Each structure stands twice: as C-alpha cells, then as structure tokens.
Amino acid sequence: MYVAFSYLVVLLLCSSALALTTQTTAVANQNKIFRYGELVCSSDGASWSRNDQDFSTLQEDRGSAASCKDGLSSYESALGVLRAYKSIHGDLVIPRRYVVPADKRFPRAWHGVLLACTVYNMKWWQHHVKQRPERVGQLNELGFVWERLQSEWNLVLEALITFSSLHGHVLVPHKFVVPRSEEWPKATWGIALGDCVYRIRARHDFLRGASAASRRDQLDGLGFVWDVHEYRYKTFYRALRHYAQLNAAGPFSEGPNKPLRVPSNYRVPGTSAWPRGMWGYPLGARCVAVRQKELYVKEKPFRRQMLDDIGFHWGGNADIGWLRVSHAAAIYSRINNRKLDVPYHFRVPVPPDDFVDKDTWPWPEHLWRLPLGQRLKDVRLKGAYLRGAYAEKRKKQLEALGFVWGPKKRGRRKSIVQEFAKI
C-alpha cells in the first residue's frame, strides 16, 4: 500500500511539473491507480491492465532463445522462484528479458524461462492472484514491484520524465540504461532507455494504433527530439548567432563589418549572458569541425547560406587574422603615402578621450590595439600568412601597399681611427 501510494505521489508531481496533457496525469479513484490515462493496477494488486500493443512489441524483441512459462503454472512454484531471485539479487525488480539460469537454486522446470513475462502474464495473474488477498500479502512481503504490471509504454514514459527532470532534456544516449538508483522510480530500473528512444525514432515503436497521436503529444510535451541531426545543427547555429550578438560581430557589428572569430578552444561559459541550456557547449571545436569536416553542412546548401548570413568564416581563424592585418596595413599605407614600413612596436591607436568626432578616426574599432608592427615583422622573418594556396596573392597585396620586405640597410659605422685618417 505504501509503495503504491508513494509511487502515485511521484507521478503526480512529475506530471504537474512538465505540464503534460490530461492523458498523462495520475489520479487515484476508488482505490485504483491510473497512469497516463491507462488503468495500471489497484493499490492492493487486485486488478491491473496491459496494453496489448506494448506486450506484442515485447514478445517480438525476446527472440527464440527462451520463452514464457504457461500462465497456469503452480503459484507455489513461481513464489519459490521469486524468493530465489530475491535472495540472489536483493529485490524483485526483474528485467523484462531476464532468463532463469540453469542454477540449482532454481527449480529445474524453470530453467531457460523468461521470468518477468511469466509473473506479469495475464493468465498467471488472473488464475493465481486476483481476488486472493493472502497471496497479495505474500508478494508484498517479498517486495513485489506492482508497478511492473503496467504497460511497457508507461514505464518508458516515466523513465523519460525522470531523465528530463535530472538532465533538462530527453536526448538520451543510445547505450543509456536506467540505473538502480533512488533518483529513479524502482519500476524503471534496468530499462534500456536509450534503445527504447532509438526504436521510437527509427521504428515508431509504441506509436501505432489508436493511442499513437496522444503518445506523440506526450513526447512532444517532454521536448522529445525526433531528428537528432537537425537538433544538433540548430543548437550550433543558435550558439554561434548568440556569440555574434554578444561580440557585435558579423551582421551585428556596429559600423564596419567585424569578422566573426571564435577561438578553437572556446566553450560557452556558465554566465547569465548565455541561456543555461548552452552552458559548456564546445562552440570553438564545432566551428573547426564545420570548416574541416563539413559537419552539419555536407550537401546542405541551405545551412551553408544560414551560416554565411551570420558572418561565419569558412577559411578559419588564420584567414580572419590575415583580413585584420591586411585591413590595418591598407589604412597605414594610405596615411603614409602608399608606403608600408611599419615600426615593429606599432599598435593601431585608439582615439584619445578628448577626440570629439570618433566617426572620423581613420582606424575602425575592431582594429584598435592590433600589434600591426609585430604582425608584419612575422611576415618578413617567418613568412606568417604566406603559406598555402593564397601565398602569392597575399604577397601581391602587400607589394601593392608599398610593403618593405627587408629592414633598412645601415652602413657599418667607421671607427675613430678611420675618421682621423681622412684628415
């Protein structure tokens, strides 16, 4: 009685918190438990129902290695098997595909039998438990999980609700199995939830028949992800767009277009400037993968155009660095009569505080404090920015700006003796 009541309270809280449809609420009425609109069982185990579609799905997944025992098999025999199972495993949370092993602790007649589908079998329950309170008491003493008598769909949905409350989403990893933890309802322990989610997407398991539409609504209410690839691309796009807004880059630039440059090791910080759901997102690594591996955009021209529209640079951060250098070099060359001989210590200046009309300042804000002298020194001595397919083109750009490739030649200073020799 206590287990069923506690379980009911948990379901009421979960359903209210997630604002599911009225079909997903759990109510108590006349000592019966209704979950997600389907009769599960009475709080004393006197009645229960099962969705035939879910049961047939389970039957298909079992394979032929084992089978369910006849529903009319001896109650005492089944009780002995349950006691043996509990003595070994500590509880009666029996996995749906658990096969009784060829172990002397189990009766020989039960070896190779699917235990869960036998004790949850309608014929066995009706023949041995229905209207027999003393047997219900025996099963309660053993810790029988009455909630396991409901349809598999109800258990999967309950596991998804719990996953969502713990993680904030229902993007369940494919290999995820519900742990035996107090955070999870006992009836859901051991469910291969990741596999269930995959089968819902790929095979539409649980989504056939008269209840299909209502179940889709329940999943949509939880934020179920039907297309994982689209979801991941949209997450990347939203994060990149938000980054551009915060940094006034791309189409959000104030004045001249500022390149959208994301460091390759950048992760979304856990600050109020970002939505909580994006915290920790590896935006820099995703940008690199989009450029180098065409992640999300391979054979997707519409997505490419979306990224172009927010200023995504396909050449990478090195190309963006060259664009800044060449832009600053062009301005310096124009100011200095088409001569680009920049002192190595030169940095792009910031307008002084008393400068009235900053719009007339020749240097755009996104170039302020750029160490142009050091960058061009690296071009001379290290060939920076001058490797790869664009090397010759960039050399010609610099030459057109009057770039001085070598340092000024200075004659060797004559010694004092040589100076006096001329006299």
Image (spheres, rainbow, N blue to C red):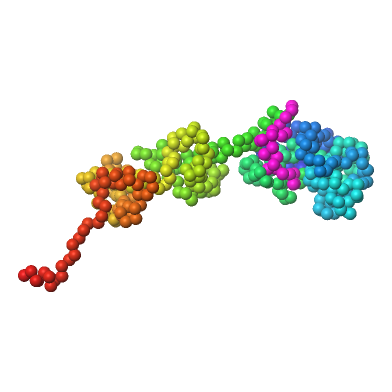
What residue range appears in magenta? 188-210
* Residue 46 visible in the current orientation: no
* Residue 178 visible in the current orientation: yes
- x and y percentages locating residue 21 in the rendered image: 69, 31
Residue at image point 69% right, 34% down: 203
- x and y percentages locating residue 171 in the rendered image: 63, 41
- x and y percentages locating residue 407 in the rendered image: 25, 56
In which quadrant of the rendered view does residue 330 lie? top left
Q: Specify the farthest residue to the bottom.
A: 417
Q: Is residue 51 left or right of residue 379?
A: right
Instruction: Tell whether position 205 is magenta.
Output: yes
Q: Is residue 213 left or right of residue 417?
A: right
Quarter of the C terminus within the rendering: bottom left
- x and y percentages locating residue 9 in the rendered image: 75, 41
Instruction: Examine the rendered structure and indicate whether residue 368 appears above or below residue 52.
Output: below
User: Residue 405 or 172: which is nearer the viewer?
Assistant: 405
